[in-house]
Image (cartoon, rainbow, N blue to C red):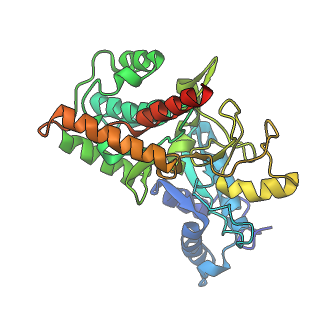
Amino acid sequence: MPRYAEDHERYDDSNRAFLQAFMARSTMTFSEAKPVLAAIFSVRDEEQVSPEDITEDDLQTYIAAANSAISPFDLEIRSILPQIEINNNDPNAPPPPAPERVYALVNTTSDALTQLATTYSADEIAFVKRILDAMFDTYNTRRQEAMVISSMQALQLAKAGAGDANRRESGTQQQQATQGGAAQSLTMTQAETMLKQLLEQGWFEKSRKGYYRLSPRGLMELRGWLVAAYNDEGIRKIKFCAACRDIITAGQRCGDRDCTGRLHDHCMRNFFRMQKSESCPVCKSAWPGDRFVGERAITMSDPAAQRARRSAANAQQAEAGPSTQFTLPEMDVEDEVDGGEEEAGSD
């Protein structure tokens, strides 16, 4: 039984204060909840309570009470572990610290894009959809599951229709149906402002190398929409970790491109220890350890492919001329290089 919930099983002002504090934030971790609950308990119990006295049971008790109160409004506080990248290749290295679980308030009926429509214009929502299409379709291929997008690539999508050539037909039709007509382009300034707001509101994250990806909040809010939009019969762009069953956007994959075996970095060590072998959880083949999902699919790809990609980009830039801005989608070039090498080897 939580220390500070023993005599407070009813939903009272302390529960309301916690829910109000939670709703004022886009997300909350246990570390962030400790001073909030300590302040609430100090007022409620009329004695000073230290954040260090707060336990995870206290947090879980207040989350459970909040969920009971908000469930009639189709809201729920859910949680997910951040998809951080961990080096699991050194067996002698000490276990890395576990990532801290992130809690977010999620609408259980309408998708997050519908909710964003109450804040942003139709053209801005169309821009967000183009970014999601780029992350989970254009830059999420059989050869390279990046699911990230660079700052330059994101800004290029400010133009309506950008990336349509690489977008699946169903995605384009869905966007047109939602917009009720052709979306208008955003200016570069508007696109930059939109990206900044999405970062500040916790929908996106930006890595040190400048790549955007969906945040834990974004993954929780958009889980159902992502599966419906990018998975259909014969095509599964959205894949799940075999250990925790959450969506995977950063981790490792099986060496067989046709296998669906995927593992988060933070799930891998314990999973292999329980399985007593470092083999794919799906096809049981040896786990390669150097086939990545997420940003590392780009940044840690084969050096020869990286050199070929840069050479191709330079050649395209020279052909386009110095006055033309041109950014070659990295994965498309690598796919062509990789495919060419396979064909050459097959001869």
Q: How many marks?
A: 0
**Residue 235 placement: quadrant:** top right
- Which residue extends farthest left? 323
Compared to residue 64, the image places residue 335 above or below, namely: above
Please give the name of the residue rendered at 66% of the width and 69% of the height, measured from the top-left corner: 97
What residue do we see at 57% from left, 44% from top? 249
Q: Position of residue 337 (x, y in %)?
A: 46, 34
Left or right: residue 155 versus residue 54 is: left
Q: Residue furthest front?
A: 347
**Res. 117 visible in picture:** no
Q: Nearer the viewer, residue 227 or 150?
A: 150
Decide if residue 265 is in sight here.
yes
Query: Is 32 drawn above or below residue 243 in the view shown?
Result: below
221, above or below 159, in the image:
below
Image position, residue 116 (x, y; %): 39, 37
Residue at horizontal 86 percent and vertical 55 percent from the top: 274
Residue at 40% from the left image edge and 18% from the top image edge? 172
Q: Quadrant of residue 273?
A: bottom right
Q: Nearer the viewer, residue 307 or 110?
A: 307
- Front-lying residue, 156 or 183: 156
Residue 35 in percent (x, y) is at 55, 74
**In the image, is 195 to the left or to the right of 23?**
left
Quadrant where the N terminus sits is bottom right
Q: Is residue 107 left or right of residue 131?
A: right
Of 328 and 234, the residue lying toward us: 328
Position in image of residue 180 (x %, y %): 33, 15
Among the 4 quarters of the image, the one containing residue 72: top right
